[in-house]
Image (cartoon, rainbow, N blue to C red):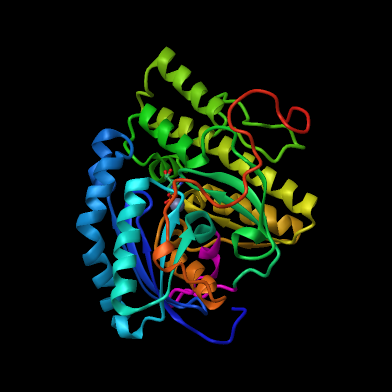
């Protein structure tokens, strides 16, 4: 991107429930992208069990790295540096990836950088998959990050933590977390997002009365726990929907509330920040309803919308490799000082939970 030198980076991601490795060039070209999902291991528990995640990463990390190198048709001698997710995530899970990455870097005398997973998600919009080229976004842009652990709007002036400013985030559940909790309430298994998305398309969104989350227009903060509580209350009072039609209608109503909120607040942020480029990243960006409604809203405003292909929206190592490539090109090398943390390095301004709210009371 900024530099003319193109380097080849091995990326490793183990922050949550995917063991992933990828080989990516600093111009965005994805040479390989291997993802080993742990969903089946966690599904019986209805959510992620941290100890299971660490153990599964330990089993899979080496074969996944080997597969990424093999599919890219390169050996470690062709790699210019290593990038690994260092934060945020499950501490034990992060350690597995970091130690594997450090071992390789040390053995091959390669530079290594720890990458923030959230910055990684924002970098997915720059990835060029074979046969699926996209025109990368131009800085500065608005980013809507919607994943299982985070939901926030950012102004991005540069693709590094110091160049990213939070405009508003969720005060409680992340959007993906709300999908997963509602999926569990409705007996749809884990993760709830993809299946609710599918069912919502068959349903009628007008048949269920659900509240609009954080509907005050002047707030860029989100809150999804009330919406989830409403679905819980409905299930408590009436039981789970008994017909497929009812189930689809409830999913459609829930999805409409989430998506409309995400889109409306993004548009408000574009206006407030006077930006005309809008990037969406994170697992919920794979949602068909969100992709469609965001495209319509962007077209109406004359803004450019960049949403990565669905595979690049959910957790992967290609986005980590690209984000790391930018850091390596700027001369960073964390070496043996690389440390993992459960917390993001992006500045957070939104206060979690209830209580006094900054700038009046947004919604
Ligand atoms: O980014 P991601 O893979 O992991 C985190 O960093 O959290 O996001 C996972 C989240 C899960 O909550 C999952 O339910 C949600 O993304 N998700 C979706 C869809 N695909 C994945 N949510 C709504 N619609 C989808 N199609
Ligand atoms: Zn993620």
Magenta residue span: 122-135
Seen in the picture, residue 9 relative to 248 is either above or below; the reply is below
- Quadrant in which residue 37 is drawn: bottom left
Residue 207 appears in the rendering:
no
Front one among 44 and 357: 357
Measured as percent of width and height from the top left, residue 75 is found at: 28, 82
**Which residue is found at the position 33% from the left and 37% from the top?**
47
State left or right for residue 299 relative to residue 15.
right
Measured as percent of width and height from the top left, residue 36 is found at: 28, 58
**Which residue is found at the position 63% from the left and 34% from the top?**
351
Seen in the picture, residue 97 relative to 81 is either above or below; the reply is above
Q: Quadrant of the C terminus?
A: top right
Front one among 180 and 56: 56
Q: Is residue 124 magenta?
A: yes
State left or right for residue 44 relative to residue 290.
left
Front one among 102 and 350: 102
């Amino acid at each position: 991107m900024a530099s003319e030198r193109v380097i080849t980076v091995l990326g490793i991601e183990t922050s949550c429930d995917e063991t992933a490795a990828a080989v990516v060039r600093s111009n965005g070209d994805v040479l390989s992208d291997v993802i080993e999902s742990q969903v089946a291991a966690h599904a019986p528990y209805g959510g992620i069990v941290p100890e299971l995640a660490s153990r599964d990463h330990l089993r899979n990390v080496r074969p996944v790295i080997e597969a990424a190198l093999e599919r890219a048709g390169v050996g470690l001698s062709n790699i210019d540096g290593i990038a690994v997710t260092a934060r945020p995530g499950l501490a034990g899970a992060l350690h597995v990836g970091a130690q594997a990455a450090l071992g390789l870097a040390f053995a091959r005398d390669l530079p290594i950088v720890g990458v923030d997973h959230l910055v990684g998600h924002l970098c997915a919009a720059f990835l060029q998959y074979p046969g699926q080229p996209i025109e990368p976004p131009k800085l500065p842009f608005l980013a809507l990050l919607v994943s299982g652990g985070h939901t926030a709007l950012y102004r991005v002036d540069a693709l590094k933590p110091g160049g990213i400013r939070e405009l508003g985030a969720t005060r409680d559940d992340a959007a993906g977390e709300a999908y997963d909790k509602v999926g569990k309430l409705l007996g749809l298994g884990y993760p709830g997002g993809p299946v609710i998305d599918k069912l919502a398309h068959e349903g009628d969104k007008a048949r269920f009365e659900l509240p609009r989350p954080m509907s005050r227009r002047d707030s860029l903060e989100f809150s999804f726990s009330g919406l989830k509580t409403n679905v819980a209350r409905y299930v408590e009072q009436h039981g789970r929907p008994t017909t497929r039609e009812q189930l689809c209608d409830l999913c459609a109503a829930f999805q409409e509330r989430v998506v409309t909120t995400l889109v409306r607040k993004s548009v408000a942020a574009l206006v407030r920040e006077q930006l005309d480029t809008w990037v969406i990243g994170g697992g919920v960006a794979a949602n068909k309803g969100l992709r469609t409604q965001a495209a319509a809203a962007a077209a109406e405003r004359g803004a450019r919308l960049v949403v990565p292909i669905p595979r690049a929206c959910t957790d992967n190592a290609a986005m980590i490799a690209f984000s790391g490539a930018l850091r390596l090109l700027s001369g960073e090398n964390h070496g043996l000082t690389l440390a993992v943390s459960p917390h993001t390095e992006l500045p957070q301004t939104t206060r979690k939970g209830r209580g006094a709210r900054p700038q009046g009371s947004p919604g």
